[in-house]
């Protein structure tokens, strides 16, 4: 009928096409109703089946509830048994632990008393040691020139002396020979108590060279061409080296200790500086030679180079020290120092201060009064050090000619 309807329509026979279409629709509606009734019957069957499944499900749910209740009862019983077991075990453990705790507490109390007794003994010994070290500080301080002695020898001077510990390996020494002031700045091996002991040996050697061996007597001191040497610092250092080696060689132990240092004789009459130097240089900062209102020549620094060898007992033999003589001028600054200042760690990167910045600092402050120079040097190195430990003794002496 669908095909005939399409055929009549294509032939423009609309009457027959309409008749065929009506029959087609009638049959189609009939088939649809049959399918609809079938679907309704299926739905009704399913609903009946669902009701049965619902009843079965309710019965199953009731059964599961009974099982759960039974299981819960069993679990409660098991939990009760487990709880009682845990309580029993805990009770036994606490009973055992209480006994162990009492024994441990007794042991701790005994050990605490022993520690407190040892601490008390250590504190007493530490106090004895520190009292001895502080007394050694007074002994070492008695070796150092007094402020009055420094002022008598050098009218304008400062001393920045910063031991790393209570006592130090750095020391300075002064004497007057033939009306000429003599100054030594020395850095002995190590710091603290060991360094201080070496410094006592070195200071004693300096005193013996002057007083016992009469190296301060001009009549006994001549150079190779028989020209008079003014209390030659080189001969004094040679004798100090000999005496220190002699002292350390008497020990049963191998002692390779000594010092670096500078010994200067200030000949103000002839405006000369006579010196001997072991590893440590001397810096002379000279004032400007030209001054105008519009321009000022900067201060300039020159170095007197030392002999590259120490004083004392070392593996290599020490050669005789050379006498060095330099002309000095009124207003110049003479700086003597140990290596502690330049070797101090600090700054933003925790590095050494170093000698070049040390030179630049001295050039920048050489025109200041001596008291202010000392303050600047002290505050600068403390600011540089920050929170880091001081690594070595520091000694800087400035003298204005």
Image (cartoon, rainbow, N blue to C red):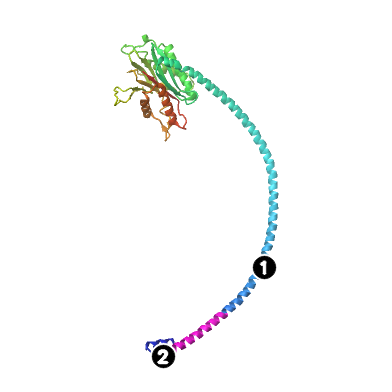
Bin the neighbour count of mark 1 within 10 Å (Cα to Cα): few under 14, some 14-19, many 20 and up: few
Q: Is residue 59 above or below residue 331?
A: below
- Which residue occupies 57% across, 78% down? 43
Q: Is residue 149 visible?
A: yes
Q: How many marks?
A: 2
Indicate left or right for 176 with 294 as reference: right
Comes first in the chain, label 2 or label 1: 2
Q: Determine which of the numbered discs, if any, sits on residue 15 in the image.
A: 2
Q: What range is drawn magenta here?
A: 17-41
Q: Give the x, y percent position of residue 242.
A: 42, 17
Q: Where's residue 244, x and y in %? A: 44, 18
Residue 228 in the image, given as x and y percentages of width and height = 33, 11
Question: Does the magenta segment cover residue 107?
Answer: no
Q: Mark 2: which secondary structure?
A: helix
Task: Find out whether the residues at labels 2 and 1 contact each other: C-beta distance under 8 Å.
Answer: no
**x, y percent for residue 241:** 41, 18
Q: Is residue 256 visible?
A: no
Q: Which mark is residue 63?
A: 1
What crowding class fits label 2: few (fewer than 14 Cα within 10 Å), some (14-19), or many (20 or more)? few
Residue drawn at (69%, 58%) of the image = 76
Marks 2 and 1, how far apart at CA: 71 Å
Name the quadrant of the C terminus: top left
């Amino acid at each position: 009928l669908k095909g005939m309807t399409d055929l009549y329509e294509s032939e423009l026979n609309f009457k027959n096409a309409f008749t065929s279409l009506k029959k087609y629709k009638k049959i189609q509606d009939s088939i649809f109703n049959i399918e609809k009734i079938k679907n309704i019957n299926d739905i009704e069957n399913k609903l009946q089946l669902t009701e049965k499944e619902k009843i079965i499900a309710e019965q199953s749910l009731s059964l599961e509830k009974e099982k759960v209740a039974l299981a819960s009862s069993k679990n409660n019983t098991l939990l009760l048994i487990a709880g009682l077991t845990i309580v029993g075990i805990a009770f036994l453990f606490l009973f055992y632990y209480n006994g162990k705790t009492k024994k441990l507490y007794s042991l701790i109390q005994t050990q605490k008393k022993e520690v407190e007794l040892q601490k008390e003994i250590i504190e007493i010994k530490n106090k004895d040691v520190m009292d001895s070290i502080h007394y050694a500080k007074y002994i070492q301080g008695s070796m150092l020139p007094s402020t009055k002695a420094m002022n008598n020898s050098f009218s304008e001077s400062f001393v920045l002396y910063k031991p790393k510990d209570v006592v130090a390996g750095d020391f300075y020494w002064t004497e007057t020979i033939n009306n000429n002031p003599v100054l030594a700045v020395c850095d002995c091996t190590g710091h603290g108590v060991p360094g201080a002991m070496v410094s006592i040996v070195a200071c004693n050697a300096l005193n013996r060279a002057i007083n016992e061996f009469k190296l301060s007597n001009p009549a006994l001191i001549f150079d190779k061409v028989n020209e008079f040497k003014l209390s030659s610092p080189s001969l004094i250092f040679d004798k100090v080296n000999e005496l220190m080696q002699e002292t350390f060689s008497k020990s049963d132990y191998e002692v390779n200790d000594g010092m670096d240092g500078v010994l200067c004789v200030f000949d103000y009459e002839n405006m000369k500086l006579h010196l001997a130097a072991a590893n440590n240089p001397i810096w002379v900062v000279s004032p400007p030679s030209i001054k105008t209102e519009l321009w000022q020549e900067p201060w300039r620094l020159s170095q007197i180079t030392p002999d590259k060898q120490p004083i004392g007992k070392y593996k290599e033999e020490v050669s005789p020290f050379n006498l060095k003589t330099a002309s000095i001028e009124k207003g110049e600054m003479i700086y003597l120092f140990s290596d502690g200042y330049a070797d101090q760690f600090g700054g933003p990167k925790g590095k050494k201060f170093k000698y070049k910045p040390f030179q630049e600092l001295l050039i920048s402050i050489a025109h200041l009064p001596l008291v202010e120079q000392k303050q600047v040097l002290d505050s600068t190195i403390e600011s540089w050090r920050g929170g880091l430990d001081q690594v070595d003794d520091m000694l800087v002496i400035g003298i204005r000619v």
